[in-house]
Image (cartoon, rainbow, N blue to C red):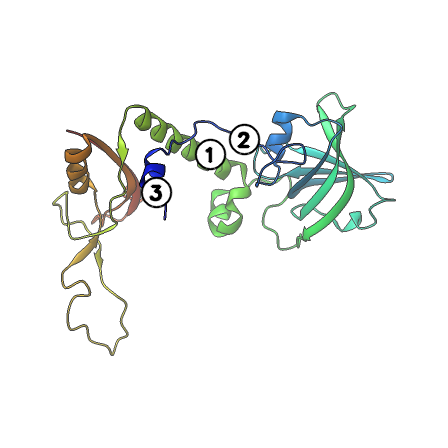
Amino acid sequence: MLRLSFILNIRPSSRQIIYSSRFTHSIYPLTIREVYDKKPLNQSINLIGYLLNVRKLKTHYFLDLFDGSLTNNQKHLQVVASLNNHPDLPHLIYGCSINVQGKLVRSNHPKQEFELQAETISLINSCDASNYPLKPKSEQTLLMLRKDEHLRLRSPLAQVVFRLRSQLMFSLYEYFYKHNFVQIQTPCLTRNDCEGGGETFRIQPYKSQTAQVEKEYFNDQVYLTVSGQLHLETAANGFGRAYTLNPAFRADKNLSRFHLAEFWMLEVEVA
């Protein structure tokens, strides 16, 4: 159990980046973004990622490696490998995942600063090109991304949206922390209807058609929260300044693209 004195002394680190590789100590695998930031030239590094492009020139293969850590997926790290040292290179195609170890050296190409000279390449997972929905150099429509949700975050558009959301969350937390607000996590299951509009989702356990529910599961009617306002007001009464950033649910009568059944809402209370 954590001591109370330890808990009270916890301070979140601001914009602290933990670098990881053989040239530093960290529990996290090295990312391509950290390679661009630290530039460990002439050192041996290990990277894990998936291939955006595979090109062959005589006895050498040029692999465009990406791992999702860069803000622009058009920016990648080029891996150069010799067919003489890596006989399995012809099996590498767009979309497959690999683990590569090699030396980072300066590149002769005017548009790229450095490249990774591969020493060992291990195939983590192959890719069936005939069934893989993300085709190289093809437009990725919103309908396709909606259909193949497990691959959605490999698309540039989805990555931009989620990175923007992540940065927005961080900025909000940082702002309220600097102004001595206490973050409160209000419950999603509640008996409160703060808005009073009756647009709530009622919660009840799943039962088979033959089963009969003799009483409420919670001995009362329970709903998905529409707002954490009441909980937040009591928190502000104790802390003075409190906020919450939690999901909210509204059972609007008009189910359309202009009405969200679930969304995230920022609420702030100052006493």
Label 1–label 2 contact, CB within 8 A: yes
**Disc 2 element:** loop
Label 3–label 1 contact, CB within 8 A: no
Q: Is residue 26 left or right of residue 84?
A: left
Label 2–label 3 contact, CB within 8 A: no
**On residue 10, which mark appears?**
none
Quick check: 217 above or below 70?
A: below
Give the crowd class for mark 1: few <14, some 14-19, many >=20 residues within 10 Å. Answer: few
- Image location of residue 168, percent across then percent down: 39, 30
The residue that mark 3 highlights is 3
Q: Earlier in the sequence, mark 1 or mark 2?
A: 2
**Disc 1 element:** helix
Q: Earlier in the sequence, mark 3 or mark 1?
A: 3
| Front: mark 2 or 3 | 3
The residue that mark 2 highlights is 71
Give the crowd class for mark 3: few <14, some 14-19, many >=20 residues within 10 Å. Answer: few
Q: Is residue 139 left or right of residue 103?
A: left
The residue that mark 1 highlights is 163
Q: Earlier in the sequence, mark 2 or mark 3?
A: 3
Q: Is residue 198 left or right of residue 129?
A: left
> Residue at the location (71% across, 33% down)?
78
